[in-house]
Image (spheres, helix red, strand yellow):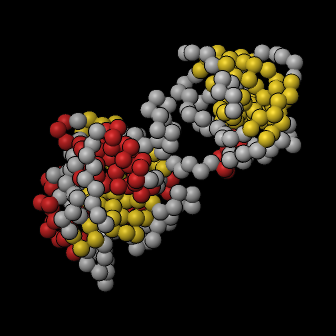
């Protein structure tokens, strides 16, 4: 890896509030000395990441004074190769100078990785989401692989080499490995009982579909997969990220209907399954609930479920899940981010008018 010339600066306590990530003023700092990036471990995240760090070899030099113009900031985690967790380090903020040939760093001391996280987290404006993807034997491959593909490209820094991923994706199934459609074996990250116990940690739940012959036993036997859906649908909004999202793809809407969460909602599914979904909802909706409206659409934002904390998003057949997930990304981030990932995927997003 190419070495980068940097300079250690130790910020005096009176200089600035280290938690202010939008510093824009002159700050006097003490130069401790120059150093070079000598090695790197793991996958070093973009500036601001606390998941991994860079090791610096520090040179001793007499201290000097420097006045710099702070225009933007970001951070590295510096730790010790012998004891990364407990070793003393420096929280460094990157300051581009008016001089084009130099990079200056300043920072504050911290003793542990936990202190670093405590300093950085409160002021971070980046949001992160935990996604559960339900799997079951015979699940259609593109129904779950499509949303995973889209979400895996979304990162705060748009850096494919060191992405600051926005979505942490976990597959959930009744067994450690399941055989999806066409004999594809997929290993689950979480078993269903564990996912149910941890359900409040999830912000998004993706429900794929499959052939009617696969779904019928799940619908008729009130399986744990339906409990997962019910428990998620009943969650309140998340205090940090806001409204949660329940996304079904293709005939995955059958499982939402069987779980009894679609009363009064407007939904879609595969065009061959529209009448079947109407029948399922008519049988499972709670007494007195309005009927479920089933339409043929590429995808539909159904609004909030009756608990008020979960937004419903349903997609039509198979590839419609790609479009619905692009829409989900545009809603949680920006339309520009959604356009960016479709360019990366070279996918022609079939966006619909709401």
The structure residue drawn at horizontal position 79% and vertical position 41%, both measured from the top left corner, is: 26
Q: Which of 41 and 306 is in front in this view?
A: 41
179 vs 228: above or below: above
Q: In this view, does 78 lie to the left or right of 133?
A: right
Residue 179 location, quadrant: top left
The structure residue drawn at horizontal position 67% and vertical position 19%, both measured from the top left corner, is: 5
Residue 88 location, quadrant: top right
Q: Position of residue 325 (x, y in %)?
A: 34, 51
- Residue that protrudes farthest toward the front in the picture: 99
178 vs 349: above or below: above
Q: Quadrant of the N terminus?
A: top right
Q: Quadrant of the C terminus?
A: bottom left
- Residue that protrudes farthest toward the left in the picture: 272
Q: Is residue 188 left or right of residue 128?
A: left
Residue 169 location, quadrant: top left
Q: Position of residue 45 (x, y in %)?
A: 55, 32
The structure residue drawn at horizontal position 37% and vertical position 43%, both measured from the top left corner, is: 341
The reply to whether residue 351 is in sight is: yes
Q: Nearer the viewer, residue 171 or 354?
A: 354
The reply to whether residue 220 is in sight is: no
Q: Which of 344 and 27 is in front in this view?
A: 27
Q: Position of residue 157 (x, y in %)?
A: 51, 39
Q: Is residue 298 left or right of residue 130?
A: left
Q: Position of residue 256 (x, y in %)?
A: 29, 63
The structure residue drawn at horizontal position 86% and vertical position 28%, both measured from the top left corner, is: 65
Report the number of numbered marks.
0
């Amino acid at each position: 890896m190419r070495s980068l010339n940097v300079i250690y600066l130790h910020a005096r306590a009176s200089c600035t509030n280290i938690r202010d990530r939008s510093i824009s003023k002159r700050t006097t700092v003490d130069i401790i000395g120059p150093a070079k990036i000598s090695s790197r471990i793991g996958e070093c995240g973009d500036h601001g990441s606390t998941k991994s760090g860079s090791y610096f070899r520090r040179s001793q030099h007499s201290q000097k004074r420097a006045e710099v113009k702070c225009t933007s900031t970001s951070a590295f985690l510096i730790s010790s190769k012998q004891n990364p967790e407990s070793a003393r380090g420096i929280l460094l903020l990157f300051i581009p100078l008016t001089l084009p040939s130099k990079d200056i760093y300043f920072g504050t001391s911290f003793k542990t990785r936990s202190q670093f996280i405590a300093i950085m987290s409160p002021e971070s404006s980046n949001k992160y989401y935990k996604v559960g993807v339900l799997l079951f034997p015979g699940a259609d491959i593109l129904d779950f692989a499509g949303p995973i593909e889209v979400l895996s490209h979304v990162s705060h820094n748009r850096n494919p080499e060191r992405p600051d991923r926005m979505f942490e994706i976990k597959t959930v199934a009744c067994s450690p490995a399941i055989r999806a459609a066409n004999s594809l074996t997929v290993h689950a990250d979480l078993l269903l009982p564990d996912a149910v116990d941890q359900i409040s940690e999830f912000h998004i739940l993706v429900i794929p579909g499959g052939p009617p012959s696969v779904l019928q036993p799940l619908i008729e036997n009130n399986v744990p997969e339906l409990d997962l859906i019910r428990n998620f649908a009943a969650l309140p909004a998340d205090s940090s990220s806001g409204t949660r999202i329940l996304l079904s793809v293709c005939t995955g809407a059958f499982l939402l209907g069987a779980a009894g969460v679609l009363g009064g909602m407007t939904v879609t599914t595969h065009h061959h399954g529209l009448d079947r979904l109407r029948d399922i909802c008519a049988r499972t909706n709670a007494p007195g609930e309005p009927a479920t409206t089933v339409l043929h659409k590429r995808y539909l934002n159904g609004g909030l479920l009756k608990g008020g904390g979960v937004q419903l998003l349903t997609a039509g057949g198979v590839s419609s899940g790609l479009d619905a997930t692009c829409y989900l990304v545009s809603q949680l981030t920006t339309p520009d981010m959604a356009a960016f990932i479709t360019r990366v995927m070279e996918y022609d997003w079939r966006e619909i008018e709401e």
